[in-house]
Image: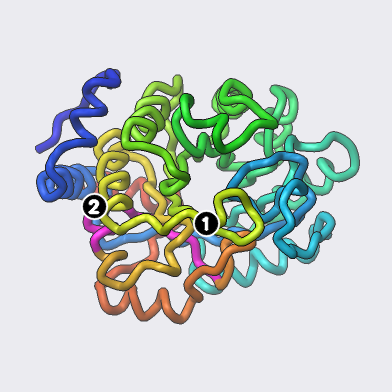
Amino acid sequence: MEMEHGPWTREQVAQLYHTPLLELMHRAAAVHRQHHAPCQIQVCTLLSIKTGGCPEDCGYCSQSAHHDTGLERQQLLEPGAVVEAAQRAKEAGSTRFCMGAAWRQAREGAEFEQVLEMIRQVAALDLEVCCTLGMLDEGQALRLKEAGLHAYNHNLDTGPRFYDRVVSTRTYEDRLQTLGHVSRAGISVCCGGIVGLGESDEDRIDLLHTLASLPTPPESVPVNALVPIAGTPLGGQPRVSVWEMVRMIAAARILFPRAMVRLSAGRDQLSDEAQALCFLAGANSIFSGEKLLTTPHPGQAKDAQLFALLGLEPRPPHEEQAATTSAMQR
C-alpha cells in the first residue's frame, strides 16, 4: 500500500514520472483504490458564459483576440440562461457545473455582479459550482466564496521554464498569485495543465512539481491533451499519444491521492480502450457534453455507452462521496 508522502522534491517527482509505465500505472491504481471508489467517475459540465475576444495571447486558444480562428464572439450570458443549462446538466447526471468566461481577469462592475448571481442560483440547485474567469484579486475571491462558489479553475498549463513560449501577456507568477487568493478565500483549487504544447518531459515534471509545491494541494487536477486549432500558433502541433496522457495521469494520481484527476480536453480523440487506460491510471472525473468551451467533445450518449461498457457510475455529490469514502476505509 502506498504510504502518505511528505513534501515532494523535484528529484522525487522526476523519479516518479520516469517510473516504467506499467509499474507506474500499478502504483497509481493502488493509490486510487485507497482513496476513491474505483468505479465512480465525477461527471462535470463546462459552459462558456462569455466566448471569444480575450486579450490574452495563449498559443493554444481559439478565444484569443490575437488569433483568427473564425470563432463567433458571444457576450456574457444572462443568469437565467445559465441556470437553465445547469438544470439540464444536473438532469443529465452532472454533479459539478463549471462556468468559463474568456477574460484576462474577472471584471468589476455589472458583469461581475451577474456572475455572482449565476453562482448563487446554480448553487441553489445543489450542484458544486466552479468558475474560471481569469485572474482574481483577493476581494473578488472572497466575494465569489460568499456567493457559494465551491471551486475555481486556474490552470498553470505547463512548467515555469516553458511558460513564456506559450503565453506572453501574463506571467507564471500572475497565475500563482491568483491561486493564492483562491486558496486563502477557502475556495477549492482546480489546477492542472496541457500535454502536447511542444514541451519536454522536464517541463511536465516542472509542472507536476509546481502543483505539488502549492501551499494548498489542488482538489482537482485537469489533465488536458492539446486540441490543435487552425489559426492558433499551436494549430500544427501533433496530437499527444495516449501513453503520454496515461503517464501524466498516473503521476498526478500518486502526487495528489485525494484529488479528482480530470480527463479533460482532447477526450474526443481517445478510443474507449485509451480512456479505460486513463481511468485505470487514476482519472476519476470527466466533462460531459458535445463541447468543452469551444472544442469538440464526446456527447452524453457516447459517455453513457462507455460507462456501461466499463461498469462505471457517476460519482455522488460531494457530501455523499465523503461518506462513501469513509465507509470504504472502515
**Dot 2: what SS?**
loop
Q: Which residue is mark 1?
A: 236
Q: Is residue 41 above or below residue 153?
A: below
Q: Is residue 74 above or below residue 323?
A: below
Mark 1 crowdedness (10 Å alpha carbons): few <14, some 14-19, many ≥20: few
Residue that protrudes farthest toward the right in the picture: 110
In the foreground, 29 or 127:
29
Q: Amino acid at mark 2?
A: Ala
Magenta part of the protein: which range? Answer: 277-289
Screen quadrant of the N terminus: top left
Q: Mark number for residue 281?
A: 2
Depth check, mark 1 against mark 2: the one in front is 1
Q: Mark number for residue 5?
A: none
Residue at the image position 70 percent from the left and 60 percent from the top:
69
Can the viewer see residue 148? no
Mark 2 crowdedness (10 Å alpha carbons): few <14, some 14-19, many ≥20: many
For residue 52: magenta? no
Q: CA distance from mark 1 to mark 2?
A: 29 Å
Q: Is residue 31 left or right of residue 177?
A: left
Percent across and percent down for residue 140 are: 74, 30
Percent across and percent down for residue 161 are: 46, 25
Q: Is residue 278 left or right of residue 132?
A: left
Can the viewer see residue 16? yes
